[in-house]
Amino acid sequence: MVRPARGKVIAGVCAGLAHRFGLSPTLVRLLFLLSLVLPGTQVLVYLVLWIVMPREGSARAVR
């Protein structure tokens, strides 16, 4: 699971998740935005994934 170099909007987390699970990036972004109206740690999870998910083409992504 990697953050793509192309097709990202902010950090590429939603696009990376969409690619991994075979979904449309637009659908994943929409689901994330809709989830923001619910109480929870969505933003914290997004930030953690931003840090943990390697960028496409980086040395960490090659593994």
Image (cartoon, grey):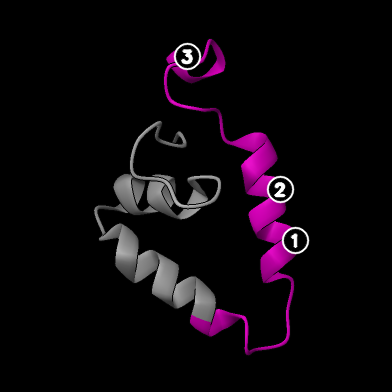
Residue 44 is inside the magenta segment: yes
| Disc with the residue nearer the chain's start (3 vs 2) | 2
**Which of label 3 and label 2 is nearer to you?**
2
Q: Distance of mark 3 from mark 2, alpha carbons? A: 20 Å
State yes or no: discs 1 and 2 in contact (Cβ < 8 Å).
yes
Give the image quarter of residue 40.
bottom right
Amino acid beneath label 2: Val
For disc 3, the marked residue is 63
Q: Quadrant of the N terminus?
A: top left
Tell me the number on the disc at residue 44.
1
Relative to residue 58, is residue 6 drawn left or right?
left
Which span is picked out in magenta? 34-63
Where residue 32 sits: x, y (%)?
A: 51, 72
For disc 2, the marked residue is 48
Relative to residue 27, is residue 38 drawn left or right?
right
Q: Secondary structure at mark 3?
A: loop
Please state which of residues 7 and 48 is positioned toward the viewer in this rendering: 7
Where residue 58 sits: x, y (%)?
A: 51, 15
Q: Secondary structure at mark 2?
A: helix
Q: Secondary structure at mark 1?
A: helix
Q: Residue at horizontal 24%, vertical 53%?
A: 22
Amino acid beneath label 3: Arg
